[in-house]
Amino acid sequence: MAAIVVVALVVFLVPAFVAYRYTAPLQRGQFVTHPWRGWAFAWAALAVPGNAELKTSGMALRKADWLFKGTAVDPREVQLLYVPKGKPYTFSNAIGGRTVTHTVVPRYRFVWQVQGVVDTVSKRSDTVVALLDYATGAVLYDVRDDLRPADLVREPTATPSPSGSPQTELKPTASPAPSATP
C-alpha cells in the first residue's frame, strides 16, 4: 500500500518539478505551491508545434543578439515563461529610474523573456529587454520602445593610445614603393 502512495505522489509531482526546472525563477513558486499546474505545463510542452521557431534558449538568445546587434542593448540571458492559454501576460520593468508596465498576448503558452543591460541607461542585468514568442519567433516586446532617443545612442568609444590620451583611429596611408635601384 505504501508503494502505491509513493508511486502516486511521484506521478503527481514529477511534472511540477519539470516545470520548476525549465521556467523562469519568478514562476517557479507556483509549481511548488500548486503542483497540479505542472501537468498543464507538461501538456503544453508535449503540444509544442513541431515547427516552432525558438525551441531552445540558445535559439532565443541568438535571435535576441541579432535583434539588438549594434545597439545599446546587450541581451545576456533568456528564461522561459509559461503563460495561461489565451490570457494576456503583464509585466513591469525598471528602466532608467522609471517603471513601465506592458501587456502582451502571445500566440502560444511559452514565451522567452530576454534579460540584459541597456548600456546607456543602467548596468542592471535583470532588465527585461525583449519578449519573444516561442512558436513564431515574433518580438512581443522590445525595450527600445520604452527608451528616449538619447538612450538609444551609444557613446562613442575612443581607441586608447599608449600615452593614455584618447585618439581617433587613423587609416593607414600608402607607403612608397621600394626603390628598384640598389
Image (cartoon, rainbow, N blue to C red):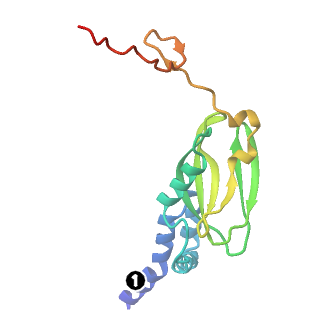
Q: Residue at x 56, y 50 (%)?
A: 66
Which residue carries the number 1 mark?
A: 6
Relative to 106, is 58 above or below?
A: above
Q: Quadrant of the N terminus?
A: bottom left
Q: Residue at x 52, y 77 (%)?
A: 50
Where in the figure is residue 89, as x and y percent of width and height?
Answer: 71, 64
Relative to 169, is 60 above or below?
A: below
Q: Residue at x 72, y 36 (%)?
A: 97
Q: Quadrant of residue 54?
A: bottom right
Residue placed most toward the observer, 109 or 54: 54
Q: Residue at x 52, y 11 (%)?
A: 165
Residue placed most toward the observer, 158 or 116: 158
Disc 1 is placed on an element classified as helix
Mark 1 closeness class: few <14, some 14–19, many ≥20 residues within 10 Å: few
Where in the figure is residue 141, as x and y percent of width and height?
Answer: 69, 55
Residue placed most toward the observer, 28 or 138: 138
Relative to 13, is 136 above or below?
A: above
Q: Quadrant of the C terminus?
A: top left
